[in-house]
Image (cartoon, rainbow, N blue to C red):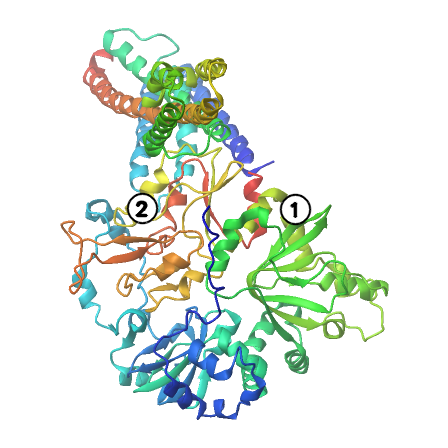
Amino acid sequence: MPLPAVADRPQRWDQPFSDKMTDGDVARILKISPFSDIDESKFTSAVALDGILRNDARILNCQAGDIIIREGDWGNSAFFILSGAVHVEIEPPATSLPDAILGRRQNKPKTLFHAFAQLFNNHREPEFRDMSSRQLAGQVGTRGAGESMRIYLQDVGAVIDRFKTVRLEAPKFFGEIAALGRIPRQATVFAEGDVDLVEIRWQGLRDIMRKDDGIRNHIDHQFRSNALETFIRDVPMFQNATQDQIEKLLRETKLETYGNYDSAKPFKDLAKEGIDSGLVDEPIVAEEGHHPNGVILIRSGLARLSQKYHHGHRTVSYLTPGGQIYGFEEIAESARTGKMVPLQLSLRAIGYLTVCVVPTPLIEEHVLGIKPGQRLTTSGPASSDQTPTQKDNSESRDVDNNLLEFLVEQRYVQGTATMLIDMDRCTRCDDCVRACSTAHDSNPRFIRHGPMYGHYMVANACMHCADPVCLIECPTGAIHRERLGGQVVINDQTCIGCTQCANNCPYDAIRMVPIRDQIGNLIRDKKTQFPLIQATKCDLCIDQLGGPACARACPHDALVRIDMRDRTTIGDLLKK
Amino acid sequence: MTSIKRRRWRNIRIFLLLCILVLAVHFVLNVSMYPSAWLSGWVLLALILGLASYNARKKLTFIPLARSSTWLQIHIYAGLLTLPLFLVHIEYRPPNGVFEVSLALLYLSVFLSGVFGLILTRVIPQRLTTRGSEVIFERIPVYINKLRTEVESYVLESVSETDTTAVPRFYLNRLQAFFERPRHFWLHLVHSNRPRQALLTDIKALGRYLNKAEQERMLLIEDRVRTKDDLDYQYSMQVVLKLWLFVHVPLTYSLLIFAAFHVLLVHAFAGAIR
């Protein structure tokens, strides 16, 4: 009888951020403020400060022009300048650094002539790449190799002269808000000259923040002064608030995070576990039947609204960032009746979730317009209209409950352009695949196959997720989100074929393909002679006239690209 | 009412209005002694050319020429409208002469193949979602091959475990041909379950002569038989969905050639008629 397999339990730092960190590097960091001001005795021996720095941090040596972070990209680490200076671009988007010099794909819509010419100009060989145009791209360069490969600006001086930037000198943090909040980077940062940086994984930064008031206060201040105000002002219920009220909101609003942040892998596992997993693994943000402590605003991530149903929980709806709120109607009803109205639904984090909690007294005072202890009159704001959450719930009722469970369990609700095919209408003609192929130089970028619920198929095509985990570990930023349309696209010029994005995608929507030259020969690496591979995926026909070719080519209205955040559209679609 | 039903009712109303218009114009022209065949003929030809251009639109997917579904709706109702136009054009009488009869038959073939195709595209997809799992047509042979390999391995295991030939004999006599390629094409088209039931009955009947190990193997084989039958069903239905266009499109091109020749003849002999 074979012996049961045994193994050491995996530990947090089995895989350090970098295996090149030395004791000398850690000592160097600990000599510089604010790290030198941290009281090391507050840390436990299991998660000691030097352990965090050794395992969750790495030293980056950047040269002039190296792009450290780009506006709009995703990242899970913050940076601290050890020596040298960096520039943060602060121009408004319309006049910001052009895509070409940031290594982003340039997506000019084709002219009618160029669109038509595809009929004759498409290559016969699959995955053709023009290596000459790669060398001529010119404005952006790459240096380094593997993990440390990065893109750089070729003429830093000209960029600094031409574009408005702010200079940050050592010692200074940057990039921490996006890392902790899992939101896109707010600005592009590049090295002025030789710069030494400490890059800290968000987990390490989180642990330091827990133990050290100085760093926590610094980051909290940064968050409240930079990110929270913009976020609060975008919430419809606070749009009429005065400056005094906004300042009070900024002081008292709490930022909370739930769930597992670590890359896409736990997310991938969760998606694979499916409906059988129940909701036990999802952290509860607020529970049905409890008193509402405040209104919850989704800042990033995805949350499930569920309700007790016999011995389980039934998914009623889901919340995504963008004005959706939770708990307001209960607070308003409490104010109206004078009795405590408990929360009617539970809110759970799916994957990683960041929320802002605006305390109940602030809502009563600034939104409902009453003082503590007062009751709301029937003509008050809460009685006049449905709140966003109520509206969302009523819209979700149009969607078959089991289908909603399927979409949430499999995380398809992440998609902003999910390919949904009604197989009761689809004649399997593959016009969609042919159209996709024609629009991408004879290379189809999706497979008309995928999981089905009833007669609906979620095809194997990039959904352009609201929270695109594929972006997180790309070393060159080749995979990025378009600034205007938000599409997730790959720049062939800077994709180094590391497969990080394909491995991270929970839906296997990114495929690695060997690339070929004009006559169909595999293009090989000069050094290793191995074929070069690159990541490919649906780009929503960003450079084509008229939008996604697949949806336009479907003769039977069976295929749609649907934004899952919009429950009304899903309801309408299912009622078709 | 759903958006697709709304669209259907709107299009039917427009179609009926156009039918009435065609008949009314024909009536007015007849009353005024104007030769309506000229007008109806040219309109009919223009419509047929427009209908045929849908095939070109399908190839020009990258040009924003309205959605393919919009084109298909126009294609369907314009196609249906050709029937009253055709009847008006031939003055409700069967044509005479070999060429005219051939042309009329060709038109009717295109029309009927179109209507047949429309019915197929509305009926078959719903059938495909209710039987077997969704499968890409081109991969069906791969799945069949996989099933055959699995069944053959069960048969071989059965021989090595029990040293009897009941299962291999049954495989050679009843299952080998079944697993070779897609089977029962026509029966699947008419939704017949007879071959499947016959095989399953034979498998059940064989059970009484098998020991426990062989029965276990046969249960696995039975499961593969059901899967293969579902694959055959998918194959038959998808073949029909793909093949009807290979009838409709070439017939359309033939019709265009005949129609062009018809126009030539009509104009060549127009003086004689006058």
Residue A543 in percent (x, y) is at: 32, 56
Residue for point 49% across, 13% down: B205
- Residue type at mark 2 is Pro
Within-10-Å neighbours for mark 1: few <14, some 14–19, many 20+:
some
Q: Residues within 10 Å of mark 2 (few under 14, many from 20)?
A: many
Quadrant holding the N terminus of chain B? top right
Q: Quadrant of residue A534?
A: bottom left
User: What residue is drawn where x is 29% and y is 72%?
Assistant: A149
Q: Nearer the viewer, residue B153 or A559?
A: B153
Residue matched to label 1: A397
Q: Find residue A576 and report its horizontal and vertical position in percent.
A: 55, 38
Q: Position of residue B29 (x, y in %)?
A: 40, 19
Helix, strand or loop status at disc 1? loop
Q: Which residue is mark 2?
A: A444
Mark drawn on residue B27: none
Q: x, y percentage for residue B172?
A: 33, 16
In the image, residue A530 sits, relative to residue A477, either above or below, namely above
Looking at the rendering, which quadrant does residue B182 occupy?
A: top left
User: Can residue B108 be seen in this snapshot?
Assistant: yes
Identity, as a three-letter code, of the amino acid under mark 1 = Arg
Residue A557 located left or right of residue A214: left
Q: Chain of mark 1?
A: A
